[in-house]
Amino acid sequence: MSSSATSDARALLVENGSVTVLRSLKTLTTRTFCSCSLHYLIHHLKMSMELDVFVGNTTVLDEDVYQLWLDGHTVTDAVRLRMETGALLECEASAEVLQSDTMDQFRTFQMCERLLQSPSKVANQLLFQIPPQRQAMLIERYYEFDSLFAREVLGKKLSKGTKKDLDDISSKTGIALKSCRRQGDINLYRSCVPPTWDYAAVVFFANSRFETGKKKLQYLSFQDFAFCAGQLISYWTVGATDSVMEDMDVDLEKEFLHDLKDLKVLVHDKDMLDQHKRQAEDFYRCFHVNLSRALVNIASKLTHTKDVRDLFIDLVEKFIEPCRSDKWTIGDLRLFLNHYSSTAHTLKAFRHQAIWDRYMGVINSCILKMYHD
């Protein structure tokens, strides 16, 4: 080794998770360690008076740094955020070491991105030695939607037209444009995307074109809509009893929507309406004819595309808002819906119990999820 290499200078080289530390003093010895942590590395630099070489073939990935990369931060911003969360104290590292570590990890993630866009390739590639559980984490997080971003694109076709709006979405939500672009591009990899309920909700709402942007619906979060999408996919779509996650491009079952017209008898037949009212009042303090009409009318109109799109605005305007005006608690609402749904089975002349249960099961769940400030 040359005299310059044996000076008191330190060289820290980080490459794809393999860390090599050179420190020279009067007496040089070499030891090899595998898969060392950055904390141990810095500590050893301070304590050792020898040449230590750390070699590892496992790619070291920091989940917090990965999230910063996914969020679209620059290296400079990521270093600042890591420092603000105490990374320097935790690792006993200098700002220069933290900068180098962050830059190296960002470079690794950028190299992995091509593989992440085809998740099946991650397990078979040889460039990065990544344990299976880490592979799963990388893929899962890469295809996660930020809830604020997902709320903005919900109900819209994820296409080139949507991409033109990414600048506006970034400005409105505060999400970095780079992150918005990544999430917008997820639709391009639809055949490769691992099945998740959040992604299924985005695709389902885009295909069905549900109205989600009106002012009265702004209080609803993406998670509210994702829950409702899960209910609709599970119980109202073609082949709803099958594994719906295998095909996210599911459609509402037209035959079922057509059969919902038969429920009109509950409000159009006066004798049946009166009987339903009496049965319900035996269990609950009042029946609320207007609420009954609202639920049945919403059902009977779902044969029309426009009314399907307006499902959520109809539920808010025709059912949820009247309940709010009467100052119902969530407990009041749950009690009414349970008794209203179940007492329909006591009506001897009513012949559509199966359709009724399939409809009200989803409607009850969605209304209860949507009933909040």
Image: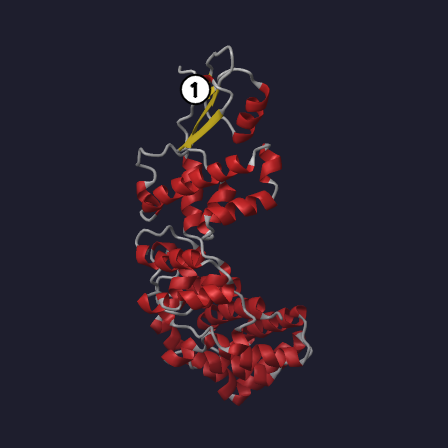
Label 1's element?
helix
Q: Quadrant of the C terminus?
A: bottom right
| Residue found 41% across the figure and 76% down from its top | 308
Q: Position of residue 80 (x, y in %)?
A: 55, 46
Q: Quadrant of the N terminus?
A: top left
Image vertical order of residue 335 relative to residue 187, above or below: below
Q: Position of residue 372 (x, y in %)?
A: 61, 69
Residue under circle 1? 4
Of residue 190 and residue 138, the one placed in the foreground of this image is: 138
Is residue 178 something one can see in this rendering? Answer: yes
Report the colour scheme: secondary structure
Type of the residue with mark 1: Ser
Which image quadrant for residue 370? Answer: bottom right
- Left or right: residue 244 compared with residue 272: left
Crowding around mark 1 (Cα neighbors within 10 Å: few <14, some 14 to 19, many 20+) is: few
| Residue found 50% across the figure and 60% down from its top | 147
